[in-house]
Amino acid sequence: MPALVLLGAQWGDEGKGKATDLLGGSVDYVVRYQGGNNAGHTVVVGDQKYALHLLPSGILSPECTPVIGNGVVVDPSVLLSELSGLNERGVDTSKLLLSGNAHIITPYNVTVDKVTERFLGKRKIGTTGRGIGPTYADKINRVGIRVQDLYDESILTQKVEAALDAKNQILTKLYNRRAIAVNQVVEELLGYAAQIEPYVADTVLVLNQALEDNKVVLFEGGQGTLLDIDHGTYPFVTSSNPTAGGACTGAGVGPTKISRVIGILKAYTTRVGAGPFPTELFDEDGEALRRIGHERGVTTGRDRRCGWFDAVIARYATRVNGLTDFFLTKLDVLTGWEQIPVCVAYEIDGRRVEELPYSQTDFHHAKPVYEMLPGWSEDISKAKTFADLPKNAQDYVKALEEMSGAPISAIGVGPGRDETIEINSFL
């Protein structure tokens, strides 16, 4: 049975939560494999809207086992708050599994994140200030705290001491901040141990056994391809690998187990935070996309930057992820435009460039080359099949598919769970 990867093919916020939730009833496990509570998914079930930050979207499907893999960084207070909020709304969260090898976002990681961004001033990256980057840095520097460390106070204390040796020097001497006490951090972290212990598991073993038993496993990426630490618009990126390869390291499953890679694309483009964005709009069209599409970050609460569809980055996402399918979301938002521009290439120093520039400098100077496609005015939110769409909407989808390099197998025509046109089954 298949192991599927589902990920963002732009700068995140493409609607991965809806796509994952749509598949949740057909899969046995949904796995978050990277990122932390800097990601956000909105899932609409009936008249209920759920905003998820750290938890896999599959937690809303009773028959599915949600998993937080070893590649995720976990803020225990956020995790417990999310679980509590869902429990209060009648959602059963008891099946959640949390990798004992996942790294913990400590209070000092959050402090370092916030003061560093403020110190950078105009050069800031635009992080969420939730300690994600510093936690991944600790992981790479081998001074990180893992979930399993909460169950050995001696090891936990030694690791916190080692981490704070350097950080307190930086906080006090560079940022003029108060030093953080080891015992306070240890006490706070130990306070979470009993509460999260029922969820802690060897998730690598669980997932590989599940695949051996012909279970269907869906790997859910946070953020998007262009925010990947290796393959995104560095340095304006996240601190992990939301691309398809990250699913293998972040969940402990070999690449030969992956059978399908699904990229989520908005019918236009958005971005949160700093960094280059060739198709960004600063006019009434951009404001209309923001208003109609409700483009506000689930986790950050920040307005998203909006622009027209960028086929160059879609092709790039197809290449670096090995995409087999696209799920096109928010097609309904484009209803009402007489003509819809689509970026088919860039102009850089007088040259036409049809692939994503290798050079950061070139990408910063890229100007979009647009092709105009006819729009539609009909309400498409009730469409159940591709044939139900107006001809111009069908042509728009076909054009995006041809430009992007992989088949569009599903289309979102509204925010609801049932407002989706399925062209080809993902399973």
Image: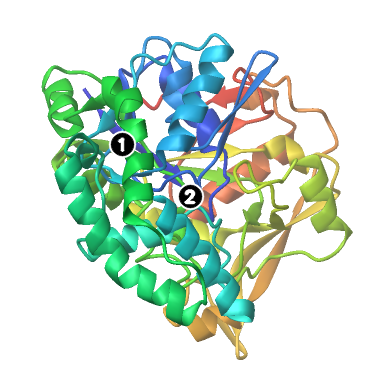
Is residue 366 at all visible to an observer of this figure?
A: no
The quadrant in which the N terminus is found is top left
**Percent position of residue 354, x then y:** 51, 72
Residue at 47%, 60% in the rendered image = 227
**Percent position of residue 89, x then y:** 59, 13
**Percent position of residue 337, x then y:** 84, 47
Q: In this view, does 312 lie to the left or right of 300?
A: left
Residue at 76%, 43% in the rendered image = 334
Q: In this view, does 68 lie to the left or right of 140?
A: right
Query: Which disc is residue 190 wearing?
Result: 1
Q: Is residue 313 left or right of residue 300?
A: left
Please give the residue where the numbered disc 2 appears in the rendered image: 223
Q: State whether residue 248 is above or below residue 178.
A: above
Mark 1 vs 2, N-terminal side: 1
Q: In this view, does 301 lie to the left or right of 291?
A: left
At label 1, the amino acid type is Leu
In which quadrant of the rendered view does residue 393 lie? top right
Helix, strand or loop for disc 1? helix
Helix, strand or loop for disc 2? loop
At label 2, the amino acid type is Gln
Q: State whether residue 87 is above or below residue 163.
A: above
